[in-house]
Image (cartoon, rainbow, N blue to C red):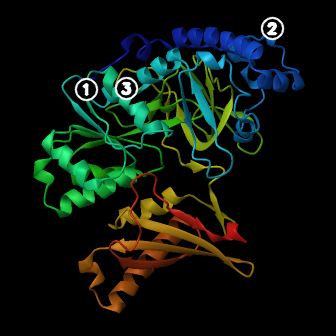
Amino acid sequence: MTKFFDKKFETMSREELKKLQNERLIKTVHDTYKASPYYKKLWDSSRLDVANFRGIADLHKIPFIKKDDLRNAYPFGLLAKKLEDCVRIHSTSGTTGKRVIAFYTEHDLDEWSTTVARALTAAGAGKGDVVQIAFGYGLFTGGMGLHDGSRKIGALTLPMSSGSTDRQIEFMIDLGTTFLACTPSYAAYLAETIKERGLLDKIKLKAGIFGAEAWSQEMREDLQNTLGIKAYDIYGLTELEGPGVAYECECQDGMHINEDKFIAEIIDPETGEVLPAGQKGELVFTSITREAFPMIRYRTRDIAILNEVPCSCGRTFVRMSKPLGRSDDMLIVKGVNVFPSQIESVLIAKGYTSNYQIVVDRVGTTDTLDIYVEITQEQFSDDLAKIAAKEKDIVFALKASLGIFGTVHLVSKYSIERSEGKAKRVIDKRKLY
């Protein structure tokens, strides 16, 4: 039976939803123009007629906000409330440049916890469940986002944070954890460890809420089969609020975007042209309920597809596909666009572990692509000829999927460093030159 946390909004008619979005968008644009000097300057320079802004019909006229804008406006330039009205911040890691800081009022935190509560409820969680949160706490949005959502649905919340795998498994068994929230790569590590220790019959997990990094359908099936659970995707960005922007229902056929709080567009990443639903392109989001840190036409760089076909769960929110890669993180190897998720799909389909690493380098003017894949001790004990044959088999499978050849290295278990947060899947040495 379908469970709803906010049935009034989650099953709104498309007409009612568009009307609500329009009202909230107009208010957000007017309020932001008055409150944020950065937005005012940007919109004035683009000659946006804010006074006569008509809502969704004029959304395409608003210039995009990009990651560089957030860095240039650091720390307070995009703030649309007085600092004294803000009660919390979160931040990106800053690994690709200056950190992005997002500000929250009490209203913003309440709105955020509602979106996460919807996600947990859609996965079947509720009062009486035990939700173990193995996302990192602190400036990262994952831990606190899932924490507040879990509390809102009345579940017993275990604020484990990431790491300490022995303790994670101990609490999972002793407290009867029913829902696990973490990155999919860490879930895979936990699953691997639990299976190796012969503890699968000791856990009571029903489902997992996994996000913060790209993962394939094959990895989902691997987690579900190993742990005997349903694995649900959750999507979000620090810039928008954190996890909960979109979530999967029991149908597991795309993530429902919380359209009462966000407007989603798909654009051509090269031209910026808005594309119709059903076409693949870059996701652009506009927040329509955030007070402190509104994001209006923010280019996420995530590549996805929007699906407006009604979902059998009864929710009317449009669905987005799993991110198919990122337009900025996408690898271009030998002139071909390559996403790590494509490689992962091939490896898992072939029966290999989800522990792998991609190394891209350049010899002279030629790109090289090396894929390191862990195999079990039993597989590693094969003679060299058998291992070489397996590597060759993967090479041709990758060629069929990617259109280019790479070099595959089957390595022993634990050769690749395990991750307790986001997995480091790609090392691009070309960037070091």
Splitting the image into 4 quarters, where does residue 406 fall? Answer: bottom right
Residue located 72% across and 38% down the image: 66
- Residue count near mark 2 (Cα–Cα under 10 Å), binned few <14, some 14–19, many ≥20: few
**Label 3 – label 1 distance at C-alpha:** 9 Å
Q: Are marks 2 and 3 in contact (CB under 8 Å)?
A: no
Quadrant of the frame with the N terminus: top left
What residue is shown with label 3? 149
Splitting the image into 4 quarters, where does residue 133 fall? Answer: top left
**Element at badge 2?**
helix
Q: Position of residue 270 (x, y in %)?
A: 75, 45
Marks 3 and 1, the one that precedes in the sequence: 3
- Residue count near mark 3 (Cα–Cα under 10 Å), binned few <14, some 14–19, many ≥20: many
**Label 2 – label 3 distance at C-alpha:** 38 Å
Q: Position of 110 compared to 279: left or right?
A: left
Residue 93 vs 242, above or below: the answer is below
Note whether residue 61 is visible.
no
Q: Position of residue 114 (x, y in %)?
A: 42, 20
**Element at badge 1?**
loop
What residue is shown with label 1? 155
What residue is shown with label 2? 52
Q: Are marks 3 and 1 in contact (CB under 8 Å)?
A: no
Marks 2 and 3, the one that precedes in the sequence: 2
Callout 1 amino acid: Ala
Callout 2 amino acid: Asn
